[in-house]
Amino acid sequence: MFAGECCIDLGAQWCHGEKGNVVFSMANHLNVLASSYQLYTNMNFVDSHGKMVDKDITDWLLQLCVDIVDKASKQPDLEGSLGDYIDKE
């Protein structure tokens, strides 16, 4: 979010991981969580210098992340965290 000339990080916007996640279990019944895939589809992203990132780039990166998470979800014997898997991929 922009406030005047400053960019403000509003904090956590995503409950990472739905299986075995205590935070997800606690918040899900409150109906405040959106699907992981819906979160970033209509948002603008800025880099650490406050410059808007081109939508073609963010769309490509989002699709890459979705593809990696989908691939991970099809591996029942996944070792380590989803974050570790994403880093590896």
Image (cartoon, helix red, strand yellow):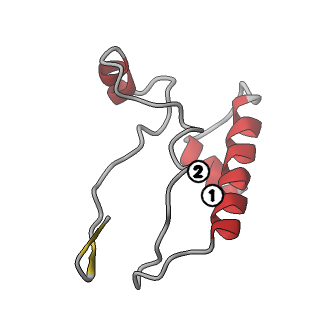
Residue corresponding to mark 2: 84
Image quadrant assignment for residue 59? bottom right
Question: In the shown orientation, is residue 11 left or right of residue 81?
Answer: left
| Residue 36, image x, y percentages | 54, 37
Q: Looking at the image, how many numbered discs can be counted on the residues?
A: 2
Q: Position of residue 64 (x, y in %)?
A: 73, 54
On the image, the x and y values in percent for residue 84 come to: 58, 50
Residue positioned most to the left? 4
Amino acid type, label 1 = Asp
User: Which residue is drawn at the image coordinates 50% and 34% (left, top)?
Assistant: 17
Question: Could you say which disc has been placed on residue 87 in the image?
Answer: 1
Relative to 62, say whether 55 is above or below. below
The quarter of the image holding the N terminus is: bottom left
SS label for mark 2: helix
Residue located 33% across and 49% down the image: 12
- At label 2, the amino acid type is Asp
Residue 2, quarter of the rendered image: bottom left
Q: Are marks 1 and 2 in contact (CB under 8 Å)?
A: yes
Asked if residue 81 is positioned above or below residue 20 in the image, the reply reads below
Q: Nearer the viewer, residue 75 or 69?
A: 69
Above/below status of 62 relative to 57: above
